[in-house]
């Protein structure tokens, strides 16, 4: 009989890391990617495909453009589930590839499903809120990303753009704090949904400067991937996904928590 999920909402103990640690996570993420490249490319390809779909609808329906990409990015932590499993297995000295990644998706867990639903709901709410903001306050319809950028930078849209950026930044900060380590924690250990979220928030709160650097690295990598017509996601998704598992391992002391068995 498998061990029950811990019946507590108390966050797990977390460790303090240095400012150099995010760069080490990136190096470890790149190493795992090169050891299992096919699975990484498949994950990156699915994210790139999603980006192209978002871009298509943004070009056709301009009111979606401001929030669509940021809402899409919110789903990132759950999209790397298979990559967390590969890094976990590689760390144990086992072989890992696309088959093990698919098995992790199929296995899933109720808390991971709830996390995915939460992120999907938050992403949808942000897209709708962003669209409403620009529909109500922009002087003319924005028919795509280029018109949005031109309005924000040239046509006196600074105040509206600033408000949108502040609201979006606050939302992304909350999502980042709740998902920095919770997806790999939920995949690997028998913890509850609320406990995983609180542990993630605690890890970020007790390591503000290193985690701010980590968030900036993710933001820069994501922006660069979008700027390359989504092609950059083929590399950044697997590297960041694997690196996030190593971040979880460094930040969370989960040794006393039962493993989640397949």
Image (tube, grey):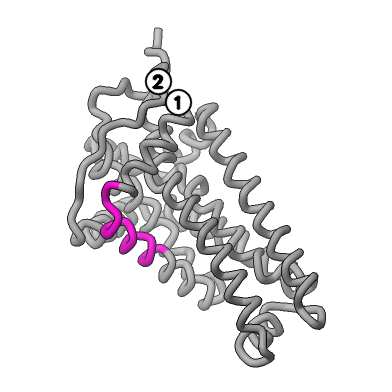
The spot of residue 105 in percent (x, y) is 51, 37
**Callout count:** 2
Count neighbours of disc 2 (C-alpha within 10 A) and say few if under 14, some if 14 to 19, many if 20 or more.
few
Q: Residue at x 60, y 71 (%)?
A: 163
Is 239 left or right of 124, judged from the image as shown?
left
Compared to 234, does 96 lie above or below? above
Compared to 66, does 82 lie above or below? above
Are the two marked residues, 2 and 1, in contact with CB atoms closer than 8 angstroms? yes
Task: Say if residue 60 shows up in the picture.
Answer: yes
Q: Which residues are magenta?
A: 206-218
Q: Which residue is mark 2?
A: 8
Q: Which residue is mark 1?
A: 192
Q: Residue 213 in magenta? A: yes
- Quarter assignment of residue 55: bottom right
Compared to 102, does 141 lie above or below? below
The spot of residue 233 in percent (x, y) is 48, 65
Q: Nearer the viewer, residue 118 or 137?
A: 137
Q: Main secondary structure of the magenta part?
A: helix
Q: Residue at x 26, y 58 (%)?
A: 210
Q: Earlier in the sequence, mark 2 or mark 1?
A: 2
Q: Nearer the viewer, residue 16 or 120?
A: 16
């Amino acid at each position: 009989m498998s061990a029950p999920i811990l019946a507590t909402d108390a966050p797990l103990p977390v460790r303090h890391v240095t400012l150099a640690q995010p760069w080490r996570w990136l190096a470890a993420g790149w190493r795992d990617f090169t050891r299992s490249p096919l699975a990484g490319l498949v994950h990156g390809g699915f994210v790139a495909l999603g980006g192209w779909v978002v871009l298509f609808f943004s070009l056709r329906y301009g009111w979606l453009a401001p929030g669509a990409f940021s809402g899409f990015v919110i789903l990132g932590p759950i999209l790397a589930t298979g990559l967390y499993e590969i890094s976990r297995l590689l760390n144990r000295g086992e072989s890992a590839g696309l088959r093990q990644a698919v098995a992790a998706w199929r296995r899933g867990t109720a808390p991971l499903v709830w996390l995915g639903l939460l992120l999907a709901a938050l992403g949808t709410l942000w897209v709708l809120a962003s669209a409403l903001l620009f529909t109500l306050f922009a002087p003319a319809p924005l028919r795509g990303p280029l018109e949005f950028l031109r309005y924000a930078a040239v046509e006196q849209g600074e105040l509206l753009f600033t408000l949108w950026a502040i609201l979006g930044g606050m939302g992304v900060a909350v999502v980042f704090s709740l998902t920095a380590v919770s997806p790999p924690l939920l995949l690997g250990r028998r913890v509850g949904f609320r406990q995983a979220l609180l542990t993630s928030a605690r890890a970020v709160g007790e390591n503000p400067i290193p985690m701010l650097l980590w968030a900036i690295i993710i933001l820069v990598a994501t922006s660069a991937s979008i700027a390359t017509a989504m092609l950059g996601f083929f590399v950044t998704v697997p590297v960041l996904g694997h690196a996030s598992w190593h971040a979880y391992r460094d930040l969370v002391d989960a040794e006393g928590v039962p493993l989640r068995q397949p």
